[in-house]
Amino acid sequence: MKSIAAAVLLASAASAHYTFPALIHNGQKTGDWEYVRKTENFQSHGPVQDVTSPLMTCYASGNQGAKTLSVSAGDTVGFTIDPDIQHPGPMQYYLAKAPSGQTAESFDGKGNVWFKIYEDGPKFGTSVNGLSWPSDKLTQTTVKIPTCIAEGAYLLRVEHIGLHSASQAGGAQFYLACAQLNITSSGTKTPAGVALPGAYKASDPGIEINLYYPLPTSYTNPGPAVMTC
Ligand SMILES: *[C@@H]1O[C@H](CO)[C@@H](O)[C@H](O)[C@H]1NC(C)=O
Ligand SMILES: [Cu+2]
C-alpha cells in the first residue's frame, strides 16, 4: 500500500506543471497567448531545466504572433497561471527594453538587457515540509511597472522556479513567459541589464538547493538585485 501511495504521489508531482498564457492589465484579463508569446510548453506545461538553454529568454522562438499592449508606467500587469503554481520556489519578474529601431514584436530579448523588477522570498521557521513561498497555489500573479523607467517597447518576463527536486544541478524547474508591452512613461531610467540565458548558473545557491533537509535558514534569489527607482 505504501509503495502504491508513493507511486501515485510521484506521478502527480511529475505532471504538476504550469504555464502563464494570458496578460493581465489593471485587473483585466486578455486572451490566452494574445499578448504573451506562446511558449513551447503550451501543451505539456513542462519546465526548462537547462539554465543555459536559449529557451530561458522567453520559452518561445520568435514572437509567436503575439500582439503588443500599450500600458503606462505605474500600471499593474501580470499573468494568469494555468492551472496554478504547484511547486515551491520564487516568483521573479524582469523587463527588457527593445533597442531603438526595434519593436516589442521584433525584439529577441538577447544581450545584457534584462533588469529585475520583482522577487519574492520564502517563509522560514518551523515547517518540516521544507521552505514555502507566497506564490503557492496562485492562479494569477501581478506586479507594478516601475514609474521611473524610460518609455519604449519592452518584454515583460515572468519566471517561477520549482525547487522541489533541486538538490542536484539541473533539478530546478523554470516556468516562464514573456509579454509584449509599449510602455508610456515620464521616467528616464534604463537600468543595467543581464543576459537570460547567461545570468544564472546551475550551481547558484538559489537554484541548486535542498528545500527539505537540512531545512535552509536563508535563501538567495538567483539573478541581479531588484532595481530601485
Ligand atoms: C508600439 O510602438 C511601436 C513603435 O513606436 C508602434 O509602431 C506600435 O504601433 C505600437 N503598438 C501599440 C499597440 O501601441
Ligand atoms: Cu511540475
Image (tube, grey):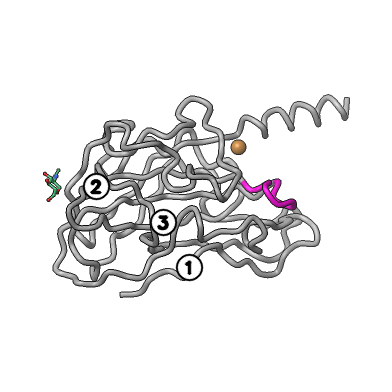
Query: Disc 1 on helix, strand or loop?
Result: loop
Q: Residue under circle 1?
A: 224
Q: Which residues are magenta?
A: 165-172
- Looking at the image, residue 206 sits to the left or right of residue 113; the answer is right
The number of callouts visible is 3
User: Residue flagged by tag 3: what amino acid is it?
Assistant: Tyr
Residue 4 to residue 63: above or below: above
Q: Residue under circle 3?
A: 93
Q: Which residue shows up at 42% across the image and 39% down it? A: 20
Label 2 environment density (alpha carbons within 10 Å; few <14, some 14–19, many ≥20): many
- Looking at the image, residue 80 sits to the left or right of residue 202; the answer is left
Point out residue 45 in the picture as x, y percentages from the top left corner.
52, 31
Q: Ligand 1 closer than 8 Å to the CB at disc 2?
A: yes
The nearer-to-camera label among 2 and 3 is: 2
Q: Earlier in the sequence, mark 1 or mark 3?
A: 3
Per the picture, the main secondary structure of the magenta-coloured stretch is loop
- Quarter of the picture containing the N terminus is top right
User: Residue flagged by tag 1: what amino acid is it?
Assistant: Pro
Residue 104 tag number: 2
